[in-house]
Amino acid sequence: MNYLGRKKKLLSSLKEGVIFLWGRPSTLSLGGSEKFYQERKFLYLTGFEEPDSALIIKANSQKPYIFFCLPRNEEEEKWTGKRLGPEKAIQTLPVDLAYPIEKWQEVLYENLIGEKTFYYQWGVFPEQDFKVLQVLQKLKKEQRADKTPQKIIDSGSVINPLRLIKEKEEIEKIKKAIEITKVAYLDIFEKAKNLKWEYEVEAMLKYNYIKNGAQGESFPSIVASGVNATYLHYNKNNSKIKKGEFLLIDSGCLYQGYASDVTRTIFPEGKPTEKQRNIYFAVKEVLEEMITLSKPGISLYELNQICQRKVAEKLIELKILKKSLEEVLEKNLHKKYFPHRMGHWVGLDVHDADSYGMEDPKVKLKPGMVFTIEPGIYIPEDDKSPYRGIGVRLEEDILIKRDGSEVLTQEIPHIFY
């Protein structure tokens, strides 16, 4: 990955100011350290995967990239593994200066003197926010007003737009994550009729991910049979899979930091009823229509608006809703059965780039953007509709190209017996 190129691109977008980013702090749990996943904006700009680190990027400076990390400590490294340390960091990372992490307040203070703008994202690590405030308070107390930042801007507002356009190597890693996910899904499809419990499916997903080189799940897998599929983020995954019911699987893996996200609703055993078929094919038709519309020049916001309308139309066709389309949309009556958006960005996060621009019609799709399309219909079990208790969601990962789009997940089949 071209981490220096990313930092230069970010720097070129700034006229002045200082960006300060945290890496994720170390975490301890009963029995030792939890599995470490770096904060994603920090990872995007540094590629550094050790805890307790930070980065300053300063516009209009001869040495704009200032890095902080844990110093070498032979005793501590016996437990947690070898560290890079500031000395090696300056030699191996594309940074200009490197310090032990305990010096960050002192160095940040010095670099904020005379700056008008401070880019920082509050709320990511609340315990660290207080220490950043201490630096700002010290500046206000010790420096003239014209020597301290007058504006504090969310750092995500300048980093996330860069993250939306995936580099070639990023796309290859997303494709590899999808390839591993495909192997897991095909294993489940092959054995579907013999699976008895949701947790068996979850175990197969995790096993195949790790076996084939992934870091693990990109989010907790949803394996929802029968009425469980009507709960959007169901992940207890402990119910029996019954004959004659849908099985919704929403899962994905993380490969070298990049995520996949795929949903298939299958019918493992038995013969689908007419009502089950109606819901399934209503969702599938919306999915196919939204794929056709996905191309450069339209926004994710506009696609979502169209998708909401199309699902509403299907609910009216099926007589689940018995109002006019205008009234359904005006009162959001369809939201009872389709409460989420059409999709989201995918990349280093499964919901990538802090959902930047998803509600902005001016953020148009461009080549290199990757996102999901995931329409669904979920009829609660206490609904008056004869379709009650049926839940279906289908999801593809989409890459925008110059001449349209590519369905990256197209080789993961839709199985409907």
Image (spheres, rainbow, N blue to C red):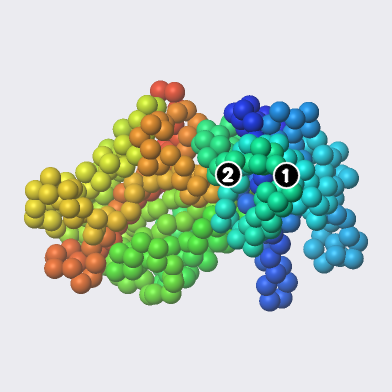
Which is more toward the observer, 49 or 329?
Answer: 329
The correct choice, above or below, for 214 with respect to 149 in the image is: below
Label 2 element class: strand
- Along the horizontal axis of the image, is 345 left or right of 51? left
Amino acid at circle 2: Ile
**55 to the left or right of 226:** right
- Label number found at residue 124: none
- At horizontal 73% and vertical 72% (from top left) the residue drawn is 32
Q: Position of residue 33 (x, y in %)?
A: 71, 67
Q: Quadrant of the C terminus?
A: bottom left
Instruction: Mark 1: give few (<14), some (14-19) or many (20+) Cα within 10 Å.
Output: few
- Label 1, on which residue? 143
Determine whether label 2 and label 1 are within 8 Å by CB.
no
Q: Quadrant of residue 410?
A: top left
Q: Which residue is pictured at 17% across the width and 48% down the height?
A: 330
Q: Position of residue 413 (x, y in %)?
A: 39, 47
Residue 394 in the image, given as x and y percentages of width and height: 34, 50
Q: Residue at x 31, y 42 (%)?
A: 304
The kind of secondary structure element at disc 1 is: loop
Q: CA distance from mark 2 to mark 1?
A: 17 Å
Quadrant position of the N terminus in the picture: top right
Residue density around tag 2, few if under 14, some if 14–19, many if 20 or more, within 10 Å: some
Can residue 84 be seen in the rendering of this structure?
A: no
Amino acid type at image mark 1? Gln
